[in-house]
Amino acid sequence: MINRINRVIFMGTPDFAVPSLQALLDHNENVVAVVTQPDRPKGRGRKLAPPPVKILAEKSSIPVLQPEKIRTEEYLDTIREFDPDVIIVTAYGRILPGPLLRLPPLGTINVHGSLLPAYRGAAPVQRALLNGDHETGITIMQMDEGMDTGDILLQESLPIKEDDTSATLAVKMSKLGGSLLIEALELLRKDKLPPRKQDNHLATEAPMISKDEAEIDWKRPAHEISCLIRGLDPWPLAFTTHTGQWLRFFSPEVIQGEPTEPPGTLCRIDRDGLVIAAGHDYLLVREIQREGANRMPVTAFLQGRPLQVGLRFGKK
């Protein structure tokens, strides 16, 4: 049965899922259908926009399903008609019901953005950055009805660089996910991919990101603030306040030293950017965005809106 992986259904929605689908197509896998979430309003005009996975599927002439509800007999019958040998899921965005997971002979395989059992949940990429991890990775997993609790099939680690954001890290991880998925399928075909149980005692969670996490607390160490800025870029973006408006900072760097100034104090302005006192060490930020304007280098920002050394950002 394992050697028979002829008909594949792929489920995914955002940019993160595109390299997985592309890898299947490049490897000449027979993707008989793609399931993705419905088109959603996007941008200032709130026009309906297709998910990135749908765009690739239609370009490749693959049938696309966009069900509003997936826990119905009607939907299950539709999937059954495609007679899949396996379902592959990458960032679909919904919890799948048991009958769907068990429908294909080889079950349902997931490309997950962490080294499970670490970071089970919706935001593993962001949580790894927010927590200051130096390493993350991709897990190919046999899905069950729990939240990322299924058996591990294959894993590969990936270093997190000091300048990585959620956006840059997700791109690298999504590409790794595509290549690791193909490796897993080839090993499955050879019956050389035994499942491995997760150690639930080592499990950590990666809950969905909330806008409530985005305000910078300058009393925290500069390293933690840097992780916050990078982890919440590109959404929802970390911010501070000044003169009743928000400011967003980007491209942070920790500068060692014990501040004598209160946290949030602008201590120095130079060609590199703004140097701000934190609860421990200093934070250099090279880019800035004010309310109602675009992101820009600090040098360009200061030409139109000078800042004075000694001012304090955020809550006092």
Image (spheres, rainbow, N blue to C red):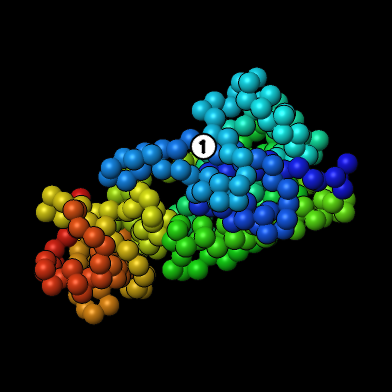
Task: Report which quarter residue 201 is drawn in.
Answer: top right
Q: Secondary structure at mark 1?
A: loop
Q: Which residue is mark 1?
A: 37
Q: Could you tell me which residue is drawn at 32 percent across and 46 percent down? A: 43
- Residue 34, above or below 218: above
Q: Quadrant of the N terminus?
A: top right
Q: Residue furthest bottom?
A: 271
Specify few, some or many for label 1: CA neighbours under 10 Å numbering under 14, 14-19, or 20 or more. Answer: many
Taking depth in this image into account, of 84 and 237 the one nearest to the observer is: 84
Can you give x and y, in whole percent of width and height, for residue 231 in the image? Answer: 42, 56
Q: Nearer the viewer, residue 222 or 280?
A: 222
- Expressed as whole percent of the image width and height from the top left, the position of residue 156 reads 68, 60
Tell me which amino acid carries mark 1.
Gln
Q: Is residue 119 left or right of residue 211?
A: right
In this view, which residue lies farthest toward the top?
73
Whole-percent x, y for residue 83 in the image: 76, 34
Q: Relative to 32, say whether 284 is above or below.
A: below
Q: Residue at x 43, y 68 (%)?
A: 163
